[in-house]
Amino acid sequence: MGWPFRAGFDLGPRYLTMLHEALRNYEKAGDTEAYDHWYRVMLDATAEQVRADPDVEQLLMLANEYIGIGAAAEAASYIEQALAAAVSMVANAPGEAAGYYLLGRVHQERGNIEQARSAYEQALAIEPQRSKYILAVRSIKK
């Protein structure tokens, strides 16, 4: 599983260093129960900070991490929060391509392919030279 903390999170460097070291030690020792427990502690701490300052990318990352540990209800909750945040971005700045791109990512994550394509195409219409928007549109098969 990936490291769920983004740069700028302030859980305290000493705390993070200790948790990260403990995870490495549990993984090396093959102690999956302890590893899973402490990974969950770190994931929940990350979730706490993301809730304080919701960011679509981080909400999607959390959803995928929770899927990875088999916590489907929590994953679904973060996907719904990501959708609400992306819709809000588009409503607050309809001329900004980034909001449409993130809305497309959320729709794609939810399996709403037509809605994802539409959002990606709107992002591309605003910034037609942006390679990540071009790739996003191409990633959706017709």
Image: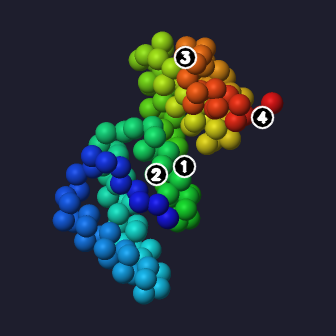
Q: Which is more N-terminal, label 3 or label 1?
A: 1
Q: In the image, what residue occupies the spot 55% across and 23% down?
A: 130
Callout in the foreground (3, 2): 3
Which picture quadrant has residue 140? top right
Q: Amino acid at mark 4?
A: Lys
Q: Amino acid at mark 1?
A: Ala
- Please state if 33 lies on the left or on the right of 67 as rendered: left
Q: Which is more N-terminal, label 4 or label 1?
A: 1
Q: Which is more N-terminal, label 1 or label 2?
A: 2
- For the residues marked 3 and 4, what is the alpha-carbon distance in whole angstroms? 21 Å
Around disc 2, counting alpha carbons within 10 Å, would you say few (fewer than 14), some (14 to 19), or many (20 or more)?
many
Q: In the image, what residue occupies the spot 55% across and 14% down?
A: 126
| Number of numbered discs on residues | 4
**Of the pair 19 and 84, the residue shown nearer to us:** 19
Q: Of helix, strand and loop, which one carries label 1? A: helix
Q: Which mark is residue 141?
A: 4
Q: Which residue is mark 1?
A: 76
Callout in the foreground (2, 1): 2
Q: In the image, what residue occupies the spot 58% across and 18% down?
A: 129
- For the residues marked 4 and 2, what is the alpha-carbon distance in whole angstroms? 26 Å
Q: Amino acid at mark 3?
A: Glu
Residue 2 % position (x, y): 47, 60
Q: Are marks 1 and 3 in contact (CB under 8 Å)?
A: no
Callout in the foreground (3, 4): 3
Q: Which residue is mark 2?
A: 62
Q: Which residue is mark 3?
A: 127
Callout in the foreground (4, 2): 4
Residue 13 % position (x, y): 20, 60
- For the residues marked 1 and 4, what is the alpha-carbon distance in whole angstroms? 24 Å
